[in-house]
Image (spheres, rainbow, N blue to C red):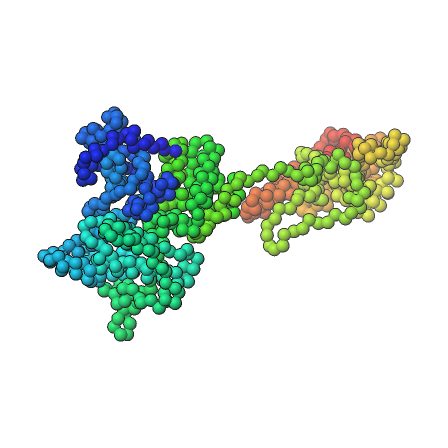
Amino acid sequence: MTRYLPESSILKPKDPTLVEDDWPIFVLSDAIVYRPDGVTLANAVLVAQEGPCIVRGRLEVDDKEDIQYLVKPTVRTANIEAKGIENYSIGDDPQGVVWLASSAGWFEISPHPSYERIYRSMCDMTVLYYILLGIYIKACEGADSKSKHRILATLDIKEILFEYAVALGNGTTYEEAVDMCVQLGPMLLAHFARSKDLDWVKSSFAKWLVKELKDRERSARSSSRSESAAPVSSHSQVGFQAETQALRPGTTPVPPPQLPSAPSAQAATPGLSQQLPFRAPPGVAANGNGGSSQVSPVPLPTYASREQSVSGSPASAVQSAVPRELRDSVFKVYLEVIEAIGAAHGDPRKVSAGKVHYGVFTKFKVRNYNLGKHLSALFSSELLASLSDSWHGSPYEAWLTSKEALEFTPTSATFLADVPNQLVRRAHQAPSASSSASTAPSSAKGPSTAQTNSPVLPSPRISGKRAVLRLPTVSKKRRFEGAFGEGRPSSADNGDSADAASAASRGSTPRPVGRPRKTAKNNHDDGDRAARHPSSQAMQVDISSDDDSSSSDDNSAGDSDSERQKKETILAVRAEPLLISTRPTGPNRTWTCPQPGCSYFVRDAGSPDLSDNSDEDDDDDGSDDNTKAARSRIIEHLRSHEKEMLSRVDLAITEGTRGHVSVDHLLEKIRTLADKNSQRTAAASTASSTAVTPTAVTSGTSWRSRFFY
């Protein structure tokens, strides 16, 4: 917050023997004028109605002649505050100038951006006043005393407004000139009461202005657009008459005029602005009788209310309907909110307006996101004067001086009423006991009968065609790596073990890992094969006997749930015979490959009466070495077909999982693989026909495990 030093600590008091025109003049940059409360912006011209004002600004003494007025000649720059200002002066500058009288002299105001609008209205009033003064002086030039009084009281208003528009030189129309005079009327009447240049109380312009303000006031009250607005007072006009009467000896103050009733207001004679205009504005069409259409009066705000300045400031609409105590309390709370947000951020100099307004919405019980923005704009001038020094140069401070903040107008005059209830910090809700209990692991609890018997209802799905996330489920399909074990990880590591465990928990037969479910035909084949191969049957019996023994041990130890959960599940893996028969069907025990397009054959492949797996588990069945070598070549050839098929599947999967890339070259790649396989087959046939030393055939268990796993 900027610290302002008292005026007396920087400047010496002025010489009481000097007249006002000889007082020293100092320039106050970034000046702001406040009412006696030090918070609300004030209009210096209305000091007689609003009371003594306070001015704050930055004093910079550069002229060597002004050093003599300083308490300490070394201190030439300081932020000062002057209180109890009751007098002002205006100057005939092309744009107008305003001075404020203090105990040290005159302060020329160079306004702060937040005070620019009020200062601009005072300058506009200054320009209007000196134009009117020039018009009356020119009209009374060369006339005697009686003629001057007559001219002052009877000068035509339309001619005055025409001269005013010409003096402005910006193309102002008649209606615009009338509206400008009405808008600046309260300030102008207040200055007429203090001016000694003319007897303004008898002037035709002052009488017309008072009547026009009353007409606009009645129109504003009777208009449906202003039903929610508070009644407008006219104490500026009363003050003008009272102060004028006080200047004359032997007169008594004039009581406030009584407001007319609604019927009389409706039947009132239309003012000058509603009669035939002097010059029609652009876009207004003439009626059939040659006259211009009447312009409906514009409802005006309360110009001269003691609770509202005539500056057109953003707070004007709120001040008329909100008590001063409520406004001050809201500002104090909001200032604490802003300081808290800056302290939470760490460095307020880097805090932007968006972060402040977002913090107000998220950290406090604010129902409207724009409430923080509206409060910042409404209290822009107060915040600039009250924020701590840590906010100096911050983006938020720059936003407070922006056009958006200065031109903010509240949409409702009573929106501050519910603000104190919203500027309360949001409370952090602790997690409830029910939610924490629901997140406890289910393994810590025993199985519930109600949960087991109750049907599992499907989770509700959002209606409509909308993309929603669904819980992942265990896939019922075998992974590609589990079906073919050549150089791939075991399917037990890829999710099939979960299927087996779930099947075991339900009491059903576990599904063989890495193999599809068996059909009825395969079950019959299993029985026939078991009868033909006692060794395979013995292996199955051993597994089942182990299972039975383990079950009996478990039953003797106890059938508790914990022991059942810890019990390991034993999977019985049963291999199926080759889908392609290795039995020789040609002459001279010749075996021919049944694959389409394959011409591979093996001579002397054994007796056709032997089964496909007659040599799988018996190495001492009397077969000679040539037969064993032939069987090995057949098995190797069948494996080459399997590898070819796996290569094609791999290629199809690769082509289909690369972001759905084009498969234009898939057929070409498959043909290339087929050509390579044909070449290998031809080479193998040549080698088999010229082979001299056959290789030994491994045991049935080893080659079976290599083939399937």
Residue occupying image coordinates x 71% and y 35%: 441
- 536 vs 14, nearest the viewer: 14
- 91 vs 155, nearest the viewer: 155
- 304 vs 701, nearest the viewer: 304
Q: Is residue 360 left or right of residue 140?
A: right
User: Is residue 179 visible in the rendered structure shown here?
Assistant: no
The quadrant where residue 148 appears: bottom left
Tell me the quarter of the image containing the C terminus. Answer: top right
Tell me if residue 380 comes above or below residue 210 in the rendering.
above
Q: Is residue 16 left or right of residue 603?
A: left
Q: Is residue 114 left or right of residue 67?
A: right
The quadrant where residue 653 appears: top right
Provide residue 493's location: percent of width, then percent of height: 70, 34
Give the tally of numbered discs: 0
Provide residue 64's location: percent of width, then percent of height: 19, 29
In the orientation shown, which residue stands out farthest toward the left? 142
Provide residue 258's location: percent of width, then percent of height: 36, 59
In the orientation shown, which residue stands out farthest toward the bottom? 289
- 551 vs 472, nearest the viewer: 472
Residue occupying image coordinates x 22% and y 57%: 202
User: Is residue 351 visible in the rendered structure shown here?
Assistant: yes
Residue occupying image coordinates x 20% and y 49%: 196
Provide residue 118's location: percent of width, then percent of height: 31, 46
Residue occupying image coordinates x 25% and y 32%: 13
The quadrant where residue 435 appears: top right
Tell me the quarter of the image containing the N terminus. Answer: top left
Tell me if residue 296 comes above or below residue 405 in the rendering.
below
